[in-house]
Amino acid sequence: MSESRTCERTIPSEGPRALPYCAYPSARDVAHHGLQELPKVLPLVDFVQARPHRSAQHKMIPATRLVPAQVLEMARVVATAFVRRNPISRHLQPPKHPPAGLMGARHTDPFGHDMFGPWTMETIHYWSIRLRLLTDPTSRQSAIRVNEEVLGQSLAIVNQAGEVLGGAFNKPTPPLDAAHAFRQGDLFMTAVVSCLEPARILFNTQNTDAMEALCTQFPAFRDAYARGKVGHHALVARANALATEEAFELLAATMEHYQALGYAYVVIAASHQWTGAACEVLGGVRVHFAPFQAQKTIRESVEPLEGTVTSPNGFLSNKDSGSMFYVIRLT
């Protein structure tokens, strides 16, 4: 087979096949932690191999074509599903009570004027998406801006009634030396960032190590990164109304969408092995593995405690697995 693995999008009429099982290392597999052995040349995205797993049932819609209410619905669908299925999000426990003043406060941005809502992980993830992806987390609280780049790169599955069934949030990959400065004095932002900080530390460390390795080994990747042509697939999730097999289309269509936008690579931190399987079917290469249970990094408690994030076992997850960082070459 030639290196070019793109093809006309002909989808099997009998429906998509389930993705193959994707094995990850465990905490005991120390030799397989950290940076992985990289090939001399990164393979091109493999749409031929992915074709049996794709779906003709649903059409992908760029988030720019959604009305504001649908954009927020997409955020809620992804947040709710993410907490139910993601091994970290369903394991961490937020503090027993929200920060003082949060429940009576209101947040205003171009999507509306809203209160925080229930103090649950689902709500926390919803606001994380709204504050850090849909809008610019560095803009002034009195003049919050829509993050047009994220909307332009993200995709949704919408049924005939206009209901969002699934979504893929994608964003540009920031430079390694970019400051992660969030808006100060924002009760919503402070609450969200503090609750998700344990996971953010793991992913930021993994991202730095993986991106440095890719830039060192592959000059073409380093050049694309410098030109802003490396996309980042951040979140993907489906509502219960959408079959698991149908959700792969969000990943495959994301790669096609990034190709159309002129991107050369996409990177993904896959903390769920379904996402890892999707990456590997598309020809993704493993770059870095970060285990969830290498050491206890969270306050251990069966019940939520005041003022701190906890987990029942002190680990990021009760799953003896981890996050695998992938790169997919598009051109």
Image (cartoon, rainbow, N blue to C red):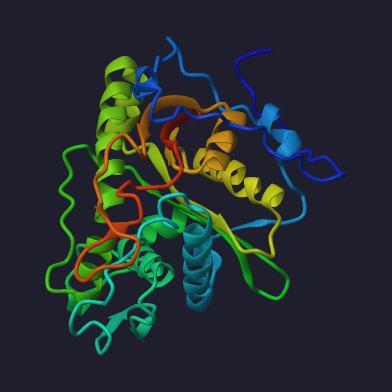
Q: Is residue 100 above or below residue 313?
A: below
- What is the residue that sits farthest to the front in this orientation? 302
Q: Is residue 67 above or below residue 264?
A: below
Whether residue 43 sits left or right of residue 125 in the image: it is: right
Whether residue 106 sits left or right of residue 11 in the image: it is: left
x and y percentages locating residue 313 in the rendered image? 34, 50
Whether residue 237 sits left or right of residue 297 in the image: it is: right
Q: Is residue 325 above or below residue 132?
A: above
Residue at 33% x, 22% y is: 35
Residue at 28% x, 73% y is: 96
Using the rendered image of the protein, determine whether residue 254 is visible from the camera's viewpoint. Answer: yes
- Tell me the quarter of the picture where residue 257 sits: top right
Residue at 39% x, 67% y is: 121
Using the rendered image of the protein, determine whether residue 264 is visible from the camera's viewpoint. Answer: no
Q: Nearer the viewer, residue 212 or 145?
A: 212
x and y percentages locating residue 281 in the rendered image? 62, 30
Q: Is residue 142 above or below residue 179?
A: below
x and y percentages locating residue 196 in the rendered image? 29, 58
- What is the residue that sits farthest to the left in this orientation? 185
Q: Nearer the viewer, residue 277 or 26?
A: 26
x and y percentages locating residue 156 in the rendered image? 57, 60
Q: How many marks?
A: 0
Question: Which part of the image, by quadrant, shows the N terminus?
Answer: top right
Q: Nearer the viewer, residue 133 or 90?
A: 90
- What is the residue that sits farthest to the top in this orientation? 40
- What is the residue that sits farthest to the right in this orientation? 14
